[in-house]
Image (cartoon, rainbow, N blue to C red):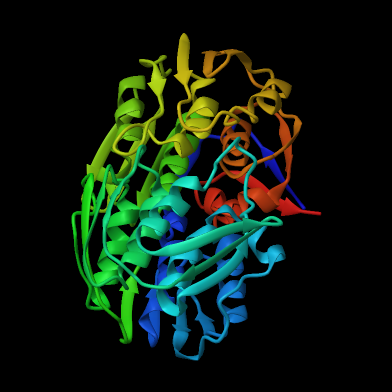
Amino acid sequence: MILRINGGIKLCGSVTVHGAKNSVLPIMAASILAEGESVIHNCPDLRDVDVSIKILNYLGCCVSRSGSTVTIDSSTMNHSDIPDALMREMRSSVVFLGAILARTGEAVLSYPGGCELGPRPIDLHLKALRTLGADIEEKGGNIICKVREFRSGRIDLPIPSVGATENAMLMASRCRGQTVITNAAREPEIEDLQAYLRRLGLNIHGAGTSIITIEGQPCKKSVEHKIIPDRIVAATYALAVASAGGKAEILKIEPKHFSTVTDVLSEAGCDLEIRPDSLKIVCERPLKAVRPIVTAPYPGFPTDAQPPLMAASLKFEGTTVFVENIFENRYRHISELRRMGADIRTEGRVALICGRKELHGASVEATDLRGGAALAVAALGAIGQSRISGLKHIDRGYERLEAALSNLGADVVRME
């Protein structure tokens, strides 16, 4: 399958943002803790969500879906391992480790897969779980875990790892006494996980700050929860308008979650009207290069928004500097953008984007999720037709991207 995009068309219309991928995946894993029924609303239709459903089914949970609502009954769970084939399908599968340990006291799984963005070791995850009582053996590519005694403790993360924070939160939910996580990740998705865990009856505080405290206890409860909007999807739609030009309204968002992106768009010359749950964006005059973009953990500029912003900045007048501090292979999309005529120069983690050179349509391939979004953003601003392959990556994080862009007036078709 490919996306065929005829570029050079100004965008106009409205588009609704779906639930956050990086929020729903850990919450689906956390549903194991409920030992009851979790009804999750605003759940996006994504490949990674499908994989999570497969994992939950394998573990013995009963999962059903109706529209954007997924219902998970974890009372029937009867496995504590995850097959290698499922683990390899997505990076976020590792977050099941903390949840399974909390529920059963043992777990066996292999190293996770996902986008090849460079080394992303899970040593911080394992160290945190060991602090809480897990004996962990790495053997033959498998991670074999067993808990003789759950114990609360203090987890000092050397870097604010999102996955390690989530795994620690999940396992700590079972440890009696107070667990403190310092230098915790501060992303909105961590706050959403805390909100779900509170619905289960857990006493947990501090998400959104660098210190999280958890008072562990067994959870047996049925709950409902609504997933927050996807801030990276919202940013991508806004950047698509910046690339193609035009005016649009982006609905059902949480503006403060991606304010670093809207700040950049405003600096570039876009006219923005930010409301409590929507964004109106107008880009009808030439845009200009902006200050250096340096990716950093939240609340810094998100690494996931870097590729689509780089694509949009190809239309900015002047040179924009990017510094990628999170993933060393986050620039894999650059070689594909060059096929479209992009003038981009790189040196290590620094990229210089020389804007306003006319882009032309080309056949390109998505090699990772956000890089695929960047190719779509660039294609919308290019002259002529582009064909984007590798849609399995895009489908991991964007629900029917072609339909969303078509709502904005783009000429986009998914085809064989």
Q: Residue furthest right?
A: 416
**Whole-percent x and y of residue 196?**
30, 70
Q: Residue furthest bottom?
A: 76
| Frontmost residue, 146 versus 214 | 146
Residue 216, located in which quarter of the rendered image? bottom left
Residue at 55% x, 28% y is: 311
| Frontmost residue, 69 versus 38 | 38
Q: Residue furthest front?
A: 148
Split into 4 quadrants, where in the image is the C terminus?
A: bottom right
Image position of 240 (left or right of 262):
right
**Whole-percent x and y of residue 414?**
71, 53
Residue 83, located in which quarter of the rendered image? bottom right
Would residue 151 be visible to someone looking at this image? yes
Total numbered badges shown on the rendered structure: 0
Image position of 399 (left or right of 177):
right
Residue 32, located in which quarter of the rendered image? bottom left
Residue at 23% x, 73% y is: 202
Would residue 28 be visible to someone looking at this image? no
- The vertical placement of 72 against 18, above or below, is below
Image position of 61 (left or right of 134):
right
Residue at 62% x, 79% y is: 58
- The vertical placement of 167 against 348, above or below, is below
**Whole-percent x and y of residue 75?**
45, 90
| Frontmost residue, 159 versus 132 | 132
Residue at 36% x, 28% y is: 265
